[in-house]
Image (tube, grey):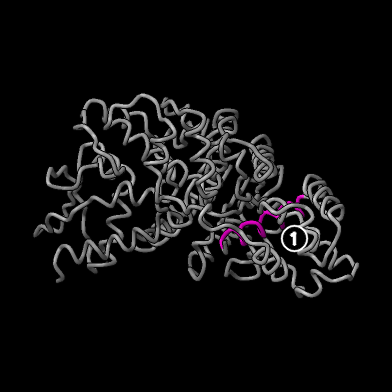
Amino acid sequence: MADLNTIWEDVLSIIREELNTPSFTTWFEHTVPLDLTDDGVFVVGVQNEFARSWLEERYAQRLSAALRQVIGAEVDVRIVVDPSSSSMSDVATADVPAANPVSIHTVEEDLRSTDTGSAQGASGDADHPFDPKFTFDSFVVGDSNAFARNAALAVAEQPGLKYNPLFLWGGPGLGKTHLLQAIGNYVTSNFPHKKVMFVTSEQFMNDFIESIRAETTNSFRQKYRTVDVLLIDDIQFLERKFGTQDQFFHTFNELRQRGKAIVLASDRPPREIDMDERYQSRFAMGLQADIQPPNYETRLAILRQFVESQRIVFEDAALALVADRSTPNIREMEGAVYRIMAFCELSRRDVVDLKTAEQVTRGLFPDRSLRPISIGTIKRETCRFYGISDSELIGSKRSQPIVFPRQVAMYLARELTDLSLPKIGEEFGGRDHTTVMHANDKIRKLMSEQREVYNQVQQLTNLIRQKG
């Protein structure tokens, strides 16, 4: 068998692919492998009690799965405090005074799991399976998620009667799990007689496999087909899991025929999930609602609510910096805040100022100021997105399939660059600056009136930012 360090490097490679950068850097970068005992326990050392408790509560199952994949056998994980491991002060490039264990424990008590990757997907016991923090009131609403939030609330208010099934989709960390949990919290509070179940598709599959192994398939059916509201997260995980898909198909049909509510969440729309056509048709029976990446204002509102819930004081400029630098992934933003909180605890700082936020988050997010967006990138990605040529984009054709992409590109040039109106007009075939103003006003108006236009512009903006 490979040595401990090699095994652990392979495990961390797997974990790194599954987590956002801030979470991995903060919680795994300073771990060290200590032992693999004869009875199959892999011992991992961390820098303090705070990190030990955090990893044990949030990532023990994930670590066991990664070790099983690397070693090829069942392995338990034991996380211990190891004084020789790196100090958590390494989360920032500054000298930090010795940690205060009581102070660290205070932060630990305040933090709660927000990672939706675990099989349980909810904190609390069996009688109260939903995290009380995930409610409709705590969901920050912006243009990017208002439609999905309102649809979820409608389902919660009339389970099984409105939008059945409801299919929520969007990229990681945008709030899908929050909405599923909010539905669960709302229904259990307002309809206490109703049975509500929230699982990930991975848990659904594991339950099905275990029922076959234990010859308890009737119990499996009883568990999933007698609920009033079934909430399944990460439904895309069922791709190519044909036996589980078949069980899901029958569960779906029976619940819907009995008027029970079904809400599914995925990281992509139904048409992009590699599942049989019969699933596509059933997903289309109800309502599909997407969640787009939040804009700066929404990110700032989300962060403001989050730091208030954690009872940590940020200067306005510090919070604005995190919102501006961060990606749209809400978990990444919160991971950055956790990192800052840990640093402040260890350095005994009561207020997060701009200098601290800048220091701690340096390197976590791409510095967009070093990669200015060019007009060429905007034109190229717009042509690719709408399937037109560069000559058509800047030419004189006035047909709608050409004019609309041209106006979108002008709008984005105005939003994403510092070019003047005359310079933008010059880049689009020597047009007058008033033409650019008209395009900007028109696209802005269409975005406020037509969700499809808003979605297109947001998707194209993300593509352009990725290209830099």
From the image, which quarter does the C terminus lie in? bottom right
Residue drawn 42% across the image and 45% down it: 115
Q: Is residue 231 visible?
A: no
Residue 14 appears at what percent x and percent y? 33, 63
Q: Nearer the viewer, residue 293 or 268?
A: 293
Percent of width and height locating residue 156:
63, 37
Q: Nearer the viewer, residue 261 or 105?
A: 105
Amino acid carrying label 1: it is Ala
Answer above or below: position of 288 versus 309.
below
In the image as oriented, which residue stretches furthest toward the right?
A: 398
Q: Quadrant of the N terminus?
A: bottom left
In front here: 85 or 398?
Answer: 398
Q: Nearer the viewer, residue 283 or 92?
A: 92
Q: Is residue 287 left or right of residue 175?
A: right
Q: How many marks?
A: 1
On the picture, is 464 further left or further right than 124? right
Q: Residue at x 21, y 28 (%)?
A: 100
Res. 70 in view: yes
The x, y position of residue 163, in whole percent, is: 71, 47
On the image, numbered disc 1 is attached to which residue? 409
- Residue drawn at x 70%, y 59% as measured from the top left: 284
Q: Which residues are magenta?
A: 451-466
Q: Is residue 35 magenta?
A: no
Coordinates of residue 234 in the picture (x, y in percent): 51, 55
